[in-house]
Amino acid sequence: MPITLSKTDYILYRECPKNVWYKIHKPDIYFESELSEFEKSIIETGNDVELVARKLFPNGILIEGRDEKAQAATQDYLVKKQEVLFQPLFVKDNYLAAVDILKYDPATQGYSIYEVKSTNSIDDKVHYHDLTFQVNLLKKCGVKIDKAYLIHLNAEYVRHGELNLEELFKIVDVSHEVDNLINGIEVEAATALKYLSQEAEPKGSCCCIYKGRSSHCSTFKHSNLDVPEYGIHDIARIGNSKAKLKELVDGNIFHLDKIPEHIKLSEIQQGQVDAYVSDRVLVDKEKIADDLKTLVFPLYFLDYETFPSAIPRFDGYSPFNQIPFQYSVQVLESQKGEPKNYDFLYAGADDPSEPFAESLQKHIGETGSVIVWHKSFECGRNIEIAARVPSAKAFMDSVNARVYDLEDIFKKQYHVHKDFRGSSSIKKILPVLVPELSYKELAIHEGGAAAETWNKITNGSFNEKEKEEAIANLKTYCGLDTYAMFAIWRALHNLL
Ligand code: SF4
């Protein structure tokens, strides 16, 4: 029984046929792991950007739904020659697509088709195919297409006052690229339809067997039964060492303790494997002590939470610039003391940059080391805040000049534990070094969820009670991030 191939599934098929087969035939496996907050926010961002892009086309009619009613409504409006349609639905020959924007030109009696992308540039491996699938289907449906356009955000745009939609978006004529692809896509879509319509599960392990763990989708373990939960795919950056990974996989070697000596791993990779195989914790006390000795009291353990808004909300922002809405800092005056926590969370409707910088200046003094985890993030935000709030520039520069990145101890492999699994993320280090502290019980336990919570606080999604709860949850989460840094710093000291 042939399935109906949607545009979305066709694009997914181009990334990985087997994965889409699971989505269609074994949704329980495909949807086994919930979407991460990051994945959810990509979907929501896409929806938000499309809503704003529609304003470029006044008087458009929205077709809602993906059912026969939506199909019939689309046909009605085509007959009436409605000038602009949003989400018209087309189904033919087992293909289905809803078009972002379709615009009728009475002069040519044809249509221009627009696909909106919530990105700052065109991804030519995906976006052209996406649009060509639609053009191909619309032609099958007897719709005359004059031009095909991609609409994406303009990274150069900086907001000043009201949003300038003409500058915020770039509308790129890609008719030529679509023409070049259309014959190939007709063939590829037919192959996809046949592959995805087969009832029997496609056989064999999947091609991600030659990629590191971070590239694997949630169905990997179902197709690759020989691969252990922790093995060669978990070696740090093994995905970049393609030849080594291939040699191991082709030799049927999946366990860390079976890696032959002639396979030369990098120092970092070898450290991880040694820690696992010998079941020993590797600690270079001298190097850790040398690093920690450079720190100057008071110590400020600092962490920011930000929201990357695709549509710039405030003056001075470009698409996807990070809005710094929260920080937590633990201030430790002396080696033996306990830190004091200060925090800031802006729940107002305007730009938090100025109050953020003002508050930070109250809590971070002129001397002392500022300890962060993954310094490029906080330092990058400090540079942006300084650009938006010139009066805070000297202070922000001084913070950046005093930053020490605690993650470096683990990145440089001064401390290696098998349970870090080759990662230097604080979420992996904390449970090993300070098992009594945990993110697990928190309502918010990762940065993506924090950003989305703040978005809901400020866009009116919450009532007063929910808002209060959300603010408390955000403070607990960010406070744990900084306390975790302090606790890891102390645990390292206790090792020396
Ligand atoms: S693990 Fe990779 S190759 Fe396998 S189904 Fe998932 S995406 Fe496809």
Image (cartoon, helix red, strand yellow):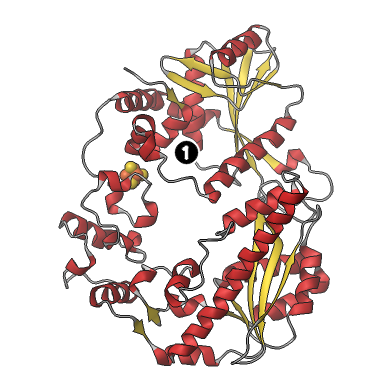
Measured from the top left, where is residue 429 in percent x and y?
A: 45, 72
Tag 1 residue = 126
Please state which of residues 137 and 381 is positioned toward the viewer in this rendering: 381
Q: Which quarter of the picture shows residue 100?
A: top right
Give the residue displayed 59% in from the left and 54% down from the top: 449
- On screen, residue 159 versus residue 190, left or right, reads right
- On screen, residue 203 versus residue 307, left or right, reads left
- On screen, residue 11 versus residue 318, left or right, reads left
Please state which of residues 315 and 178 is positioned toward the viewer in this rendering: 315
- On screen, residue 403 versus residue 184, left or right, reads right
Q: Which quarter of the picture shows residue 71?
A: top right
Give the residue displayed 28% in from the left and 25% down from the top: 198
Q: Amino acid at mark 1?
A: Val
Residue 394 appears in view: no
Task: Please tell me whether residue 212 is drawn above or below residue 68 in the rendered image.
Answer: below
Residue 112 appears in view: yes
Q: Which quarter of the picture shows residue 188?
A: top left
Name the quadrant of the N terminus.
Answer: top left
Measured from the top left, where is residue 383 in percent x and y?
A: 69, 69
Give the residue displayed 41% in from the left and 14% down from the top: 93
Please state which of residues 489 and 12 is positioned toward the viewer in this rendering: 489
Q: Residues within 10 Å of mark 1 (few under 14, many from 20)?
A: few
Determine the secondary structure under disc 1. Answer: loop
Task: Please tell me whether residue 283 is drawn above or below residue 32 in the rendered image.
Answer: below
- Ligand 1 lies in quarter: top left
Name the quadrant of the C terminus.
Answer: bottom left
Measured from the top left, where is residue 236 in percent x and y?
A: 36, 66
Measured from the top left, where is residue 229 in percent x and y?
A: 29, 57
